[in-house]
Every structure is written in structure tokens, then in C-alpha cells.
Amino acid sequence: MKCGSLMPISALPSDYGIGDFGDGAYQFVDILSSMGMKIWQVLPLNPLGFGNSPYQAYSSFAGDEIYISPDRLVAAGLLDRHDIKPFNAKYKLVEYIKVRKNKRPLLLSAFKKFKQSPQLRDQYQKFIKQNQWVDTYAIYQTFKKINGSKIWTEWPEKYKNWLKNKQVNLKEYIEQTEYEKFIQFIFYWQWLELKKYANERGIEIMGDIPIYLGLDSADVWANQDLFLLDKTGNPTNVAGVPPDFFSADGQRWGNPLYDWDKLKATNFKFWIERLSGNARLFDILRIDHFRAFDTYWKIPASCKTAIDGEWVIAPGDMLFKTIYQKLPEIKVVAEDLGDLRPEVYTLRDKYKLPGMKVFQFHFDLYKSNKEFENNKNMVIYTGTHDNTTLLDWYSTLSPKNKRQLRSRFKIANKGPNSISRDLRRKIISYILNCKAKYVIFPIQDILGFDACARINIPGKIGSPNWEWRLADYIALKAEAQFIAQAIKKSKRVN
């Protein structure tokens, strides 16, 4: 039984406008360790795509250069200290365009210095040899920049189908492709050093893997035959979920769907490589939208909403059997939220995958919560990146439900500030004492932040999604003693 926290890298305090792999990340690990936490859950670290969403990435293997720490580049001798200066150090929101504009010259300078210095070349060559996806990704990113950052389906034919026809002479772009490979080398180097630091302090990293990939990605460009695409490369059908209580039109995500027959014919090679690569980066893998391994909602690409679709059976059992044959030590958490058919739980339980429960959704105010409290193979959250904060959730309850919640946790109504702190602490202590394998608290809920600290609103694209970040660790350090005592009292210290 372990306890952890959900905190995106982007939301860490830093001097450069966005959380990165620098001192702020190492300080966060130290704070988690001081509290007795054993898991740090992050969001996907892949190159951010449309709307700066980590779930619409340009690659499922590559990392985004935006998280590279300038300070660590100085320590590695790839930048001089006078080259860098703080940027929006205390500003609470990530301004992605400005951050990229500020970091890009630093990365180019580091690349120039790297080429003139032989010290890191052996490590670099070893990285390239061990990560065969890097060459393809570097070519994809180079072509994308040559073509004005357009999606690959709009590239001229010689770029669009280069993997088949090799009509572009890559020698003309060797500088650009080498830069892209250098960025991935530095990203992996900095991240794995941070992960090692966390692991040495008894903290596992839980990564988050979207089940689907964006059409505008190196993965789809390089594996077009594994997706349901037409002759132009555009999807014939797309992913999403049907209408429900929350959305009359459902959710049309737009990701291309897998051609599961083709994947089966390769013994799921693509998925094995994807999971194997991510298992190197993370100790535990949370797979988003697990239900689509059982049945997935297939929407005709011509439909503008998710209303007109159909449920299609996926070969989830065959896939996971292969996964555990090839990767027997892999640790997977299944995101199994929502109204699911029984077969989804059968698949999850057959492979002993922990499922998920969210306090905001699953705690019954008026009935017994024995199943919630006693289910061991589970991860309990106060909320996820898609939920509002615990404090904001409380504010949306009806007066009757607020009274009932305070009654269940024996909280006197002494004013809103007292309620927010006392109720938050009681809920955290309650969850810690449940029997779930893992319990995870977003930092916003530990600190009692309101809706301004929400990470994402599903169905909404653009600001302020993915922009929140923590200004400093002052409040977290002040709360650390309570969390440490609550964890120790719950005996959730393994």
C-alpha cells in the first residue's frame, strides 16, 4: 500500500516560465520523501500537440524540449551561466509560446557547443543506438518544420511518403535532424537522472499513456498501415465516446483508430515497443481510457459529433496476454472510470490490473462505502487532471449535500476557511486509511486550492487548460508535516 501525489512537470516552480527537470523537480522529490510518499504521478511528457495538450502529442516515444532544464545544461558544460536569465519565475500560468521562444535559443546554443565537444559523444551514440525510434522522429520533426508545421497529411508527396519512396535527400537536412536527435538525448538524460534521484529515495514514477495517438504524430506517419486511414492519410473513423449525462453530443476526440487486425498480424509489435519504451521512463504506467481495449466507440470521420458511432469489440485479452508474455515485469494501472460493461472489469481483473476510483465520483454521501474502502486492487484519487479541485467540488454541492458531507466527516460549520482545511484533511486521512493499493492526491487538493488551480476541463481546447503551475513550495512545506503524520498513522508506508 503506497501513497503518492499527482503533479505535472509543467506545474512545478521554476525560473523559466514552466516546470522542468531542474532544481524545482529535485526539491519536489525531497518534499514527497519528507512526507513519506512513495509515488509521483506525472502527465505525458511527449511533445505537446494541439492546444498544448499532453494527450495530443507528436510522438509517444519522444520528449518535449520544453521540459529541458537550462540550469542542468550549464552544469553539463553546454551553456554558460551568463547565457541564461530567469523568465516569468513567479508567474502562475504557463505561457507556452513565450516559453518556447525563450528556450529555443538556449537549446540551439547548447547544440552548437555539443558539436564542438567530444565529451558526450559516446553517450549520445549509445542513446541513438538503443532508441531506434529517434531517427524516424528526427526526420518527421524536420519535415514538419520544413512544411510550416503543417500536419503530415498536407505535406507534398515526397515528404508525406518518404518512408516508402525515399525521394528526399536527407543529407540536405543533416543539421536539422542532428539537432532533433540531440534534443531527445538531452531530454532522456535529464529525465532519467531525475527518475534515478526519485527512485533512490524510494519514490516510483507513475507515467500516463494515452491509449490513442494524434493523427499529427510521428507514430501515425511512420505506421500508416496500422491505423484506419484513407489513401490520403486521413482517418476514415475516429475515436471518442458516445453521448451521456454530461454531454448530449458525446465527445469526438478525432484520433485515428487502430486497425486491430493489422496489429494482431504483427503480434502487437507496435504496442509492445510503445510500452517497453515507456516502462524505461516510468516505474508504473497508467493507461488512459482502458475500456477501449475491450470495446471502442467508432465514429465516422465525416460526423462532426460523436452521436453517430458504434461499439466495436477490441482484442484486449489477446493484447494483454502478449504484453505479459513479452514484458512480464511491467506495472499497469487501468483507467476504468465511467459506465462500463462487465467485460471491461473482467479483462482488468484477469490481468490483476488496479482500477481507479475518484472520491468526488464514488463516495456515497448517504450509503455505506464498504466497497470503496475495502477494495485492495485499486487506486483512489481525490481527483484527477480532468476533475476540478476538491475545494471547488465542495463549493458546487447543494446545501443539503454539504451538510451531509460535513456530518459524515464530523466537521463543524465554523466558516468557509475552517471547512476547507478541516474537511480536506479529514478526506485525505479517510482515503489514506482505505485498503487501496495506491492512493494519489493532486497537489492542489493537498494545498486546498480552488478552481483556479484546475489543470484541464475535458471538451475544452486552449487556455487555461494545462497552464496552471505552482509559484513556490512555501505552502506545500507548511502542509508536509500534517501529510507525513497522516501517512504514518495510516501505516501506508510501504
Image (cartoon, rainbow, N blue to C red):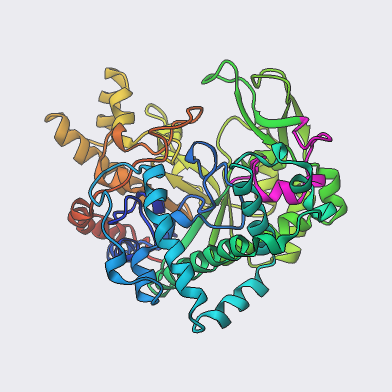
The percent coordinates of residue 103 (x first, y second) are 39, 55
Asked whether, in this view, residue 44 is left or right of residue 228, the answer is: left
Towards the viewer: 395 or 476: 476
The percent coordinates of residue 86 (x first, y second) are 26, 57
Towards the viewer: 372 or 195: 195
Secondary structure that dominates the magenta span: loop
Q: Residue at x 47, y 70 (%)?
A: 112
Measured along the vertical axis of the image, is residue 112 above or below residue 270? below
Tag count:
0
Residue that extends furthest to the front in the rendered view of this protein: 172
Magenta segment includes 225: yes
The percent coordinates of residue 245 (x first, y second) are 54, 19
Measured along the vertical axis of the image, is residue 341 above or below residue 475? above
Part of the protein shown in magenta: 210-236
Q: Residue at x 33, y 53 (%)?
A: 12
Q: Is residue 276 visible?
A: no
Measured along the vertical axis of the image, is residue 219 above or below residue 253? below
Asked whether, in this view, residue 190 is left or right of residue 243, the answer is: left
Magenta segment includes 152: no
Towards the viewer: 383 or 468: 468
The percent coordinates of residue 426 (x first, y second) are 26, 43
Q: Residue at x 60, y 22 (%)?
A: 250
Query: Which quarter of the rendering shows the C terminus?
Result: bottom left
Asked whether, in this view, residue 307 is left or right of residue 51, the answer is: right
Q: Residue at x 27, y 68 (%)?
A: 82
Q: Which image quadrant for residue 468? A: top left
Q: Is residue 150 visible?
A: yes
Asked whether, in this view, residue 294 is left or right of residue 59, the answer is: right
Residue that extends furthest to the right in the rendered view of this protein: 265
